[in-house]
Amino acid sequence: MRWSWKIGRLAGINVYMHATFLLLILFIVFVNYANGRSLATTFVGVVFVLVIFACIVLHELGHALTARKFGVQTRDIILLPIGGVARLERMPEKPREELWVAIAGPLVNVVIAAVLLAILVATGFHPHWRDFRWAGGNFLEKLMVVNLWLVGFNILPAFPMDGGRVLRALLATRMEYTRATQMAAHIGQGMALIFGFVGLFSDPFLLFIALFVWMGAEAEASMALMRTSLEGIPVQQVMLTDFKTLQPDEPLSTAIDHALGGWQQDFPVVFGDHVLGVLTREDLMRVLAQGGAEARVRDAMRREFQTVDSHDMLEHALAVLHSCHCRSLPVQHDGRLVGMLNADNVGHFMMVQSALRRKKALAAQKASSNGEASRHNGGFFY
Ligand SMILES: [Zn+2]
């Protein structure tokens, strides 16, 4: 992830801190300063936050090490101001394994809280459950409460929280994986609506959580859909074969005619059936503004572009689309232009696939229970 610094390595896993994390520290310093607190108090406040994040690293490590037990490696752990993220290379294969990986994180916080309680009791300090307060108060007691809060928050049955994955794993033992994900995502979004509604009338922080949960649920559902939709499908099955091309010497006005008269936004620029470049809508607009409609296609096209082969797997093609941040790709075979792959079109294709699959969900159950994880996205977040 960009804007992250490596802060250490634990059990062979690199731990990164995101730059925005510093904002959190600055915020605490600022709040303490604005309230006229002493330097010592401010320092304790900062240390407290750092210790909380150490607990979060242990939580992520719980996920990562449990995943490793099932043969799944973790790319890295990233600390964000809203919590931690462990990026697993893929999902564990069996629902039962996913359940363990998901629940291992919150279990770590249960253990930490239990140890802190034991220390507190052993040193003769009894937690003030009733008149608990954040300002002042016992450091260990506050830390215990934070860990319990982390447990409660994480076991909410909503993506992207651990509880959402536990729910999905439980559902996946009874139904097809994609359907289990969609159902869990719907439950998550239902909860997000409730959070948001309650947040409107009470704590604005809940609104923030609602948004976070809503987006997490959406991302998870589409990721799972992709994972089962893309297996074993070659590019040529999805690519468009009816599209317009441009010649390098044509004026941009030709491109405008094509663009206004059809669906296409990007045009391959060809000599014969050999691709020389790609003219995207953005390049077209930029050069139109500078040189007018009489400028040549060759002056506006981009010469650095990616292509895929029609025999490539769709999963690979999507990874290329994703990494070049482009909307479409020329598809070649034996050095000849044979089609265009368009991100929207792939989306439509997957929707059709998912509708068809729902029909034969039962038949697919066996095939998808050993589903391979897709590798084209940034990993699976915990
Ligand atoms: Zn977790």
Image (cartoon, rainbow, N blue to C red):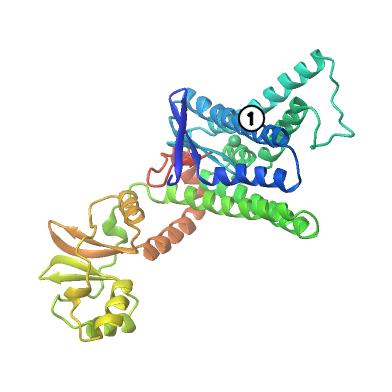
Residue 153 placement: quadrant: top right
Q: Position of residue 62 (x, y in %)?
A: 56, 27
Which residue lies at the image location 64% right of the left edge and 47% below the top edge?
27
Q: Quadrant of the C terminus?
A: top right
Q: Relative to 7, does residue 343 appear above or below in the rendering? A: below
Q: Tell me which amino acid carries mark 1.
A: Val
Residue at which label 1 appears: 51
Which residue lies at the image location 31% right of the left edge and 80% below the top edge?
259
Q: Relative to 162, does residue 203 appear above or below in the rendering? A: below
Q: Nearer the viewer, residue 237 or 17?
A: 17
Which residue lies at the image location 32% right of the left edge and 78% below the top edge?
285
Which residue lies at the image location 58% right of the left edge and 33% below the top edge?
102
Q: Relative to 374, does residue 202 appear above or below in the rendering? A: below
Q: Quadrant of the N terminus?
A: top left
Q: Is residue 381 visible?
A: yes
Q: Quadrant of ligand 1?
A: top right
Horizontal arrangement in the rendering, residue 56 relative to residue 252 (left or right): right
Q: Position of residue 269 (x, y in %)?
A: 18, 71
Q: Position of residue 47 (x, y in %)?
A: 65, 31
Classify mark 1: helix, strand or loop: helix
